[in-house]
Image: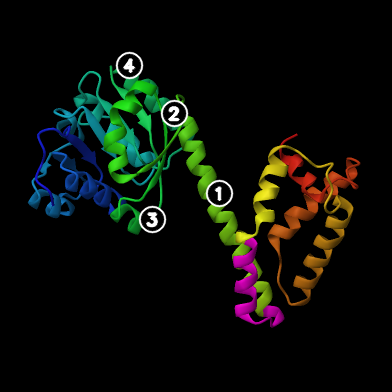
Amino acid sequence: MSMPSADKPPVAFIGLGKMGFAMAANLQRAGHPLVVWNRSPEKAGPLLAGGATLAKSPAAAVQAANIVISSLADDKSLRAVVSGRHGLLRGLRPGAIHIGTSTIAPSLSDDLAARHKAAGAHYIAGPVVGRVPAAEAAQLVTFVAGAADAIEAARSVITTYAPMMVVVGERQSQASIAKLIANFLGASAMDLIGQTLAWAEKAGLPAPLVQQMLSGFFANPATSEYVAKIGERDFDTVGFTAAGGLKDVKLMIGAARDVKLRLSSAEALRAKLRAANARGWRDRDWSCFTDIDRS
């Protein structure tokens, strides 16, 4: 661990789970003096050995810091740490900046922003994207939203653990939504991968072939083309029709059923393609089914 630097602002760090500990360790390596708090104080041991100070409560942890970072498991944990007689709002200095790195409800992000403003402080929603190894390597990505001047004041601290910092805007809930969309993309991709492999296994296809197909799909330029096509609602430049798409999706569902597998994603696609065809879109590009959710 690096020794604290006189030219680096002190940081209060709240929550030392696996992600939080890794992020706090990055701050310490960068020379930031640290005051830490965690429900289980023994987790702070290595940080204390590197020169950090352990506080008895969230309120006590933040009293001497202009920048506070929290890394907590869920909405309930964050509310508990912010509120109450020993909550960090009781100890925040005027003008202090609290960066919340947890994945929480967008409504809670806006509520926290209002409560911090009432207390004379700033709240930046800064949920991070990445797993523990990325946190340990200081290679996280973060979406941030809040007052522009507060974000700039905290930039050098945030980029210590998340060098890719995406500023979403001033409304804190927007950063939470961006993080949830990132997780939705990841979960949906995993669901697609899982259903594809299950279908292939039950049908007796060689696993290496299917893994190659999956890798090719996610690397295929056509995937990026469809991102632009759907984003621009360009459904009249037709590569494959909605009528043909519905026919193929029905075939997918039937083929999977033959090997006793239910393709829940394909069933959802069938419902949307049926709706698209019912709207008279049968001769538009089959990606038009995505507009069912947007109209």
Q: Residues within 10 Å of mark 2 (few under 14, many from 20)?
A: many
Q: Main secondary structure of the magenta part?
A: helix
Q: CA distance from mark 2 to mark 3?
A: 23 Å
In the picture of the structure, the residue carrying the numbered disc 1 is 184
x, y percent for residue 235: 81, 42
The kind of residue tagged 4 is Ala
Q: Secondary structure at mark 4?
A: helix
The kind of residue tagged 2 is Gln
In the picture of the structure, the residue carrying the numbered disc 2 is 172
Q: Secondary structure at mark 2?
A: helix
In the picture of the structure, the residue carrying the numbered disc 3 is 131
Q: Residue at x 64, y 74 (%)?
A: 210
x, y percent for residue 139: 35, 51
Residue 91, placed above or below residue 37: above
Residue 130 located left or right of residue 274? left
Q: Would you say the residues marked 2 and 4 are in contact, meaning their CB atoms lie under 8 Å apart?
A: no
Q: Residues within 10 Å of mark 1 (few under 14, many from 20)?
A: few
**Which stretch appears magenta?**
202-217
**Who comes first in sequence, dot 1 or dot 2?**
2
